[in-house]
Image (cartoon, grey):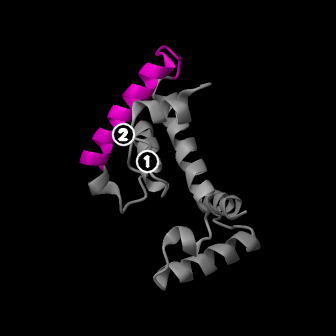
């Protein structure tokens, strides 16, 4: 339920009016208060580990689609490129952009940003990324 409320809040904030459903606004306000009081963000917003994994996996799939929109690479090669690019991004760009919203990044780099920002442990190996993001793509 919390992930659904988060998605509603983000969609509302991305609109010109910025109006969100009252339930999502109440949830976000309460969670942000808990976060400001020192609770970890995922705990403050009551995001479960499953929610965080879902967000990470969705970002990995988005990165895979951007990297290879015409499916010219094999799933294994696509996973290898993603693993290398994610490691490179994490080492060079992530320290600089981790405290931003990532809106200034190009779409592929934004997807990598979302993988790391998800709060779930990033999948770093080619095998793990293959299992999570590219099988069936």
**Which one is earlier in the sequence, the residue at label 1 or at label 2?**
2
Q: Relative to 100, is 82 above or below?
A: above
Report the side of 100 relative to 65 (left or right): left
Give yes or no for contact between labels 1 and 2 (Cβ–Cβ under 8 Å).
yes
Q: Which residues are magenta?
A: 69-93
Tag 1 residue: 122
Alpha carbon separation for disc pair 1 and 2: 9 Å
Q: Can you name the residue that lies furthest to the front here?
A: 127
- At horizontal 44% and vertical 24% (from top left) the residue drawn is 78
Residue 71 x/y as whole percent:
53, 17
The image quadrant that residue 44 belongs to is bottom right
Give the label on residue 86, or none.
Answer: 2
* Residue at (36% x, 39% y) in the render: 86
Q: Which mark is residue 20?
A: none
Predominant SS along the magenta part: helix
Residue 123 is situated, as x and y percent measured from the top left of the image, at: 44, 42
Neighbour class for label 1 at 10 Å: few (<14), some, many (≥20)? many
């Amino acid at each position: 339920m919390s992930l659904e409320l988060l998605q509603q809040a983000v969609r509302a904030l991305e609109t010109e009016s910025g109006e969100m459903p009252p339930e999502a606004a109440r949830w976000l306000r309460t969670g942000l208060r808990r976060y400001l009081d020192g609770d970890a963000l995922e705990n403050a917003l009551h995001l479960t580990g499953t929610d965080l994994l879902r967000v990470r996996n969705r970002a990995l799939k988005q990165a895979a689609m951007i990297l290879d929109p015409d499916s010219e690479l094999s799933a294994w090669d696509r996973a290898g490129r993603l693993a290398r690019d994610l490691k490179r991004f994490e080492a060079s760009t992530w320290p600089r952009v981790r405290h931003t919203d990532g809106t200034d990044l190009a779409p592929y780099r934004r997807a990598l940003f979302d993988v790391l920002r998800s709060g779930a442990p990033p999948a770093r190996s080619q095998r793990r990324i293959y299992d999570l993001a590219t099988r069936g793509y």
